[in-house]
Amino acid sequence: AASADSRRSANQAPPQTGYVGAEACVTCHEGFDSSVNRTKHAFAKDPRTPFAQQGCESCHGPGEAHVNDPAKVRPKNFTKMAAKEVSETCASCHNRSQHVFWEGSQHDARNVTCTNCHVVHRPKTEKGLLRAASQTETCAACHRDKANKIDRSGHMPVREGKMQCSSCHNPHGSKNVRLLKAGFTINESCTSCHTEKRGPFLWEHAPVRENCATCHDPHGSSNERMLVAKNPFLCQRCHVHARHPATIYDAAVLSTSNRVFGRACATCHSQIHGSNHPSGNFLVR
Amino acid sequence: TLPTPQTPMEQARSTIGARAFGSIDFGGRFTDISGDKARYQRYRDLRDGAFARNFLFGRRTADWTVEVTADNIGYRDQKFTVDYRQVGRLKASFVWDQIPLFISGDTRTLYSEVQPGIFRLEDTLQARNEAGTTTLRDYVNSTAGFELRTRRDTSAINLVYSASRDVDLTFSVTSAQREGHIPYGAPFGFNNAVELPVPIDSRTTDASTMIEWANQKGLVSVGWDGSWYDNAIETLIWDNPLKINDSPAYATAYSDGRGPAQGRMALWPDSNQQYVHGTASVVTPGRGRLTGYFAVGQANQNAPLLPHTINSQIPVIPLERETTEGEVRNTVFNLQYSARPVNQFLFVARYRYVDVDNRTHHFETVGRVRFDGVLDDAASSPEPEPYSVTRKNFDADATFTVVPAASIRVGYSNAIGDRTFRHWEETTENTFRVSFDTTGNQVATFRALFENSSREGSGLDLHVLEAVSEQPGMRQFDIADRDRRRATLLATFTPNEYVGVNASVGVGREEYPNSEFGLQEFDSTQMSLGIDVFPNDRVSVNAVYAREQYDSLQLSRTASPAPNAQWFDPRRNWFTDYDGTVNNLDVGMDVAEIAPRTNLRLSVNWSDATDTYNYVLTSDTVLTTPRPLAPVVSEILRGSIDVAHRLSDRLQLGASYWYENYKVEDFALGPDIASALVLPPLIPGLPVTATNTVLLGYIYRPYTAHTGLVRLTYLW
């Protein structure tokens, strides 16, 4: 591995008063330079990285006093700092793009900080420098109920590795609700992939326009198409119309009624997300 | 002693300035599945054969980096990526990702897709059924089997050009092509349900660009997002299995399919959406930041409208216009202020305005045709209701750090929703919350949250309910008056480097106090207990058990419409009492150097869900006592063993075994029921009781699967 000093480039800021340089740090903290060197933090030619500035001391603070008296003067130790101080240190560089809405976000407001999920020196993932081996594992530390839903029979391709939590969410804050990454509403987040349901349709179904999560649980469900309840019971939560919507579909009619077997109501009302047929107001055309 | 970093996370990756790095896994795989091979493979391709995956090739210098990856090469779930970075100047990436969705391997149909979206039956089948000389059951052996699957192929290019230390230009294009078939309902009447493998052939193209200036004092960005959805098959046409000739309109859709010889449905129309948006953020005194963004956008859909019916015996109903002329205008505005004037206090206030204004032109209906068979006049034909909603949200939170590493947050939210064509013109929800969090302590973490919210509607529009023969006391639960309470607790305890314990509890309750009908209440409870053990440097064990419980109660009334006395008779009320329980267990163990140069990894995952739906009648009921439905059970047990032995510094021999067992009992989608309806019956000998229904045989079936892999991993 190249030494920390050898990575110093013309872009790198000259040492300032109180700073000793990374070479001095690794004299005692052996191995930490090579661990950083495997990350983008070490790209000294990128003026936004710590190694384009003061190296280790960009994050851990000036080290001269610590070198002079290691026992009494400690550098910044991120595992022992207050959450807000950790966030401020990282946000001094990570202040754009996906981090714009960090301050005041749901996580920030509850003193969740960068080092709860990320670790620069001992990451278990290349992307994101996560503490845990996967995003799911990282998020599950607090959101266990959501992570467990991925194991249900109806689920997004998360456990197959084709999606991860950050496919939909930006844990650093977002323009959308619930830290959703795409769009400005829950529906826009969902229709960023399920575009066929975006509409607008000639005939709309009110709850579809309101919120996809009214009927679907995007984290997983035991029901067909990740519905929050099985059909026809889900539909009957709103449809108490005369005749067939408010009928008891019990075991006696199970084998003969297409309103309960198969996909129940959606067997006929297949255009449940909206119809573009001029006679489509019952969402069957 | 000073802590030292562990082994780098990925051995193949090198350090800056070093030689090229890379790795590849290759070997052979064998899969044995008894039962539902589709559900086991769902989003992956586990066919037998040779495989190459986890390919990585890269090089990092101080000036540039490049990295190429490939996974599951040659299989349906293959993925390729290329990343190039000119350090400090340019980031460019390309992704090709295939996501398969294997829906069913056992589906069968009588139909032939003669053109994309056009499904035909043998004329003799239709003619004989219409004449009554045969029924559908006579054709159960004429069905053709096929696999039901789709695949989404996504390609994406992302570019970020750093024009200076503070300015970035970003550009991205993503194109997602989706092809295949999905099960889809296509009915001719209440007792003539048909299920078809509806073709999917569509492409979504998204493009966006943005310029962003940011430094430690603030940020300004301006961008544009565009999205286009193009569907190659916008019309579905299919034969009626009970008719060969069109018939004139009949009076009711409570029929066995009299009327049309074929049906026609409008599938998903082309659409597009554009946004222009801007964001500004500035650091303010008192360690504060003021951030605002504004976006205006428009979604359009102007697909040609089909005629009202394909039934030649029904008079043509004139269309008010030839295309949809659908248009939604979106306006989004957000302003947020956060400040930490002192270390012990954080204040956040946010106002959010989202207007979804559906401006789809009024569509005057002068009649309609239900199921291509029932003609209604103008008086019986409602007009479309373009739903619009305007949401105005205000949130304020104050976080107090009362003692070091412990904070209390109190917060308030007010959410107002203005809607068109809903039974409430406006809803207002007030939420109060308090949370307590300890952080910064490596031994123990405790997080607690309590939230109480109340939603009320105003401006009741009973016509919305009456127009669809709905009980006037019913309230649609997504906007109904609601009281909601929620509490969560999360605790972790790590007394030393050898063991860590974590536990969580979540309790929630929703009540709908003013809903005479519909959803009445919903309760949820989740709890988990986990432990991580690291007895020595070589071994780690973790286990998490979780249990969830859900209960809901909804109220309905079986009745003929008013003025029939049934409509007002509470003795005809009935409840659906739902109870759901889920148990989840995850266990994992890693053992390094279990034998010389050999590592072992074990994992077990178990998820067991049981749902029961019970009908409950009133004590003075006049309804027939329902026969209870069997519980719906879904249990998945997965286990895996992986052994890796280092043959040399560059070569590793590995073997894996995956076991998966799925048990399912579903009264609506199980073979016991569907076999009587699908053609042919899956279980020979069962009676074909519903002769007018043609399903695909897409059902839930259990499976037991074994997959074994032997691989060589080569590092360079």
Image (cartoon, coloured by chain):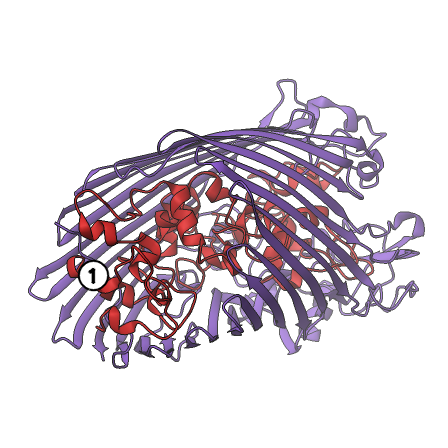
Chain colours: A red, B purple
Q: Residue furthest left?
A: B596
Q: Position of residue B462 (x, y in %)?
A: 82, 33
Rendered location of residue B634, percent (x, y): 41, 47
**Above-or-below relation of A96 to B81:** above
What secondary structure is found at the residue carrying circle 1? helix
Q: Is residue A2 left or right of residue A255?
A: left
**Can residue B29 be seen by looking at this rendering?**
yes
What is the three-letter code of the residue carrying label 1?
A: Ala
Residue A143 showing in the rendered view: no
Residue B624: % across, % down = 63, 29
Instruction: In this rendered view, identify the residue nearer to me: B552 or B663.
Output: B552
Specify the quadrant that holds the N terminus of chain A: bottom left
- Nearest the viewer among B554 and B333 is B333
| Closest to the observer, B516 or B237 | B516
Pointer 1 residue: A24
Q: Count the labels in the image.
A: 1
Query: Hey, which quadrant is residue A273 in on the image?
Result: bottom right
| Left or right: B216 in relation to B426 | left
Residue sitting at 43 percent across and 55 percent down? B701
In the displayed orientation, state which residue is furthest to the top.
B620
Q: Residue furthest front?
A: A17
Please indicate whether residue B313 sits to the left or right of residue A61 in the image.
Answer: right
